[in-house]
Amino acid sequence: MVVASLFLLNLTPLSGGIKNFFHSLSAPLQEYLWVKGSALSGFFEIFSRVEEVKKENESLRKENENLLVEKMALGECKEENVSLRRALGLELQKDFVLLSANPIAKDVFADFIVVNKGSADGMVFDAPVVTDEKVLVGRVIEVYEHSSRIQLTTAKGNSFDVEIMDRDTYGLAEGQGNFNLMLKLVPRDKEIAEGDRVFTSLLGGNFPQGLLVGEVKGVKKADVTSFQEADITPAFNINFLENLFIITNFR
């Protein structure tokens, strides 16, 4: 009612003196209403700004998530490129046709891993699998459209011919399971020692020659046999396998 009276007062044709009198009386009230109105207007402005900030924060959060995904993808690409350059430096590409792949699953009880490349990518059954440092990891035993199963060299019952190049000595590497390898059928008269490096041999034709298998450990000689044995520490660590290369044309 008071506000309406003030409004009418400003519209009615009263003399300046009368208006001045009423303005003097109503000035405190008008000032109060102006302050309250401004405060109320500020409240709604702040409320509106809070909603804007929330939307901005949500947009920034999504942008940060996208940037994080891109950073991770770039990091993976960088690692693959470094690995590929290292493989090229070892001239793997000169000797073989290579297909790069990454592990996506592993079975620690059966000594095998699954990689993210399959028949659609050019994967080849029975192909050797190596690291960028020319370390033998295993071979392809099952090929699917977009993935493949790799049997590790340490798988139980798996065997292949090897040699200790520095000693011109040959033997047989045999998987024992649980990521263990043994060197067998080494003649007793051949000298082998801990730390000797074991490589794949051309004998048997299972793998290309010269791939690093591991190091000799714990040589065992028995008086009743013509051969000696030793443990082999694999040159790869299952927990750190990342970028692998499949040799698709070694035969």
Image: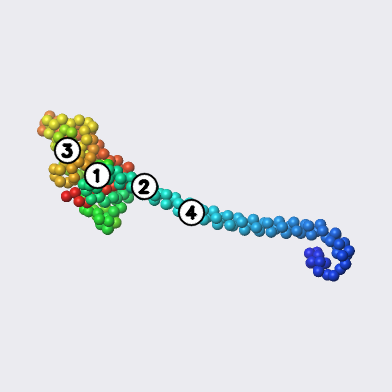
The answer to whether residue 196 is visible is: yes
Q: Nearer the viewer, residue 89 or 35?
A: 89
User: Badge 2: few (under 14), some or many (20 or more) residues near its Cα, within 10 Å?
Assistant: few
The mark found on residue 78 in the picture is 2
First in residue order: circle 1 vs circle 3:
1
Q: Nearer the viewer, residue 176 or 23?
A: 23
Residue depicted at 45% across the width and 51% down the height: 67
Q: Quickly name the residue at label 4.
A: 63
Say which amino acid is labelled 4: Glu
Residue depicted at 79% across the width and 59% down the height: 30
User: Badge 3: few (under 14), some or many (20 or more) residues near its Cα, within 10 Å?
Assistant: many
Say which amino acid is labelled 2: Lys
Q: Quickly name the residue at label 1.
A: 91
Residue depicted at 18% across the width and 45% down the height: 208
CA gap, disc 1 and disc 3: 21 Å
The mark found on residue 163 in the picture is 3
Say which amino acid is labelled 1: Glu
